Amino acid sequence: MILAIDIGNTNIVLGGFQDNTLAFVARIATNSSKTEDEYATKIGSILRLHGVEKTIVKGAIIASVVPPLNTVMKRAIKMVYGVEALLVGPGIKTGINIHCDNPASVGADLICACVATHHIYGSPSLIIDMGTATKIMLMDQNGAFCGASIIPGVNIGLKALSSGTAQLPQISLEAPKSVVGKNTIDCMRSGVVFGNASMIDGMIDRYNEAFGEPLKVYATGGLASTILTHCKHEITLDNDLVLMGLNILYKKNA
């Protein structure tokens, strides 16, 4: 089994690939103050719940947007499974070109999502990753990463709305029955859910205009299913894009 680890700002997503099939997905909260011993204990316990014993893990690969946890996670994986985890970053073979001012600055999660989309669905394409931040990435017809937009995430906006006002409460994230809210909570839900969906629709239109033709759109991330189902454009949801990209990169570099 190959262990794929996506370290995000909010959650760490763990995926296990057996013969290129995603056997399980697990999530733990990101906490940059935890030590390798604590993460080793946590990961070992969670994977045992999924029937993963130490002896079946033969390799691991990590994508991280939280640099303080890079070495911590590599040591934790080494401690539990005795393997040296690969880290997505400069020097790793991706199979795609990166047409940016500073290719080394492109986030590991963006690279993984683009690699998976190119290999599984093809190019050109537009990829939307809705996590702590909302990222929109463009792949051209040759499978090259051309650039991206980074937007404050849905939950960031929702928390700012509650904490920055005196009378607006904290609410759960779900769509109201109508765009026209009749109470405070539904008004907030309308703005957050339909507002973000409309923003995504508008950004897709702008990317299509910049590219010169309509692009196929793919989406991933924890909030994608909540927001993007209310978009007017056709969007293919794939919650495991980053993990699939990690598996592809492991095979290219192991």
Image: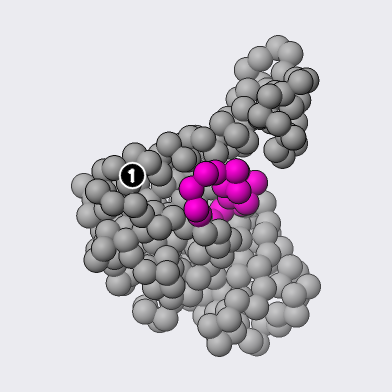
Residue type at mark 1?
Tyr
Relative horizontal placement of residue 76, taking residue 93 as reference (left or right): right
- The residue that disc 1 covers is 207
Q: Position of residue 219 (x, y in %)?
A: 50, 55
Residue toward you, 60 or 122: 122
At x 52% / y 59%, what residue is drawn?
Answer: 236
Instruction: Give the quadrant of residue 192.
Output: top right
Q: In the displayed structure, would residue 244 be above or below residue 89?
A: below
Residue bounds of the magenta highlight: 220-235
Q: Which quadrant, please, contains the C terminus? A: bottom left
Residue toward you, 234 or 65: 234
Residue toward you, 166 or 65: 166
Q: Position of residue 190 (x, y in %)?
A: 66, 29
Instruction: Give the quadrant of residue 144.
Output: bottom left
At x 74% / y 35%, what residue is drawn?
Answer: 177
At x 72% / y 18%, what residue is drawn?
Answer: 168
Relative horizontal placement of residue 94, taking residue 27 as reference (left or right): left
At x 55% / y 62%, what residue is drawn?
Answer: 238
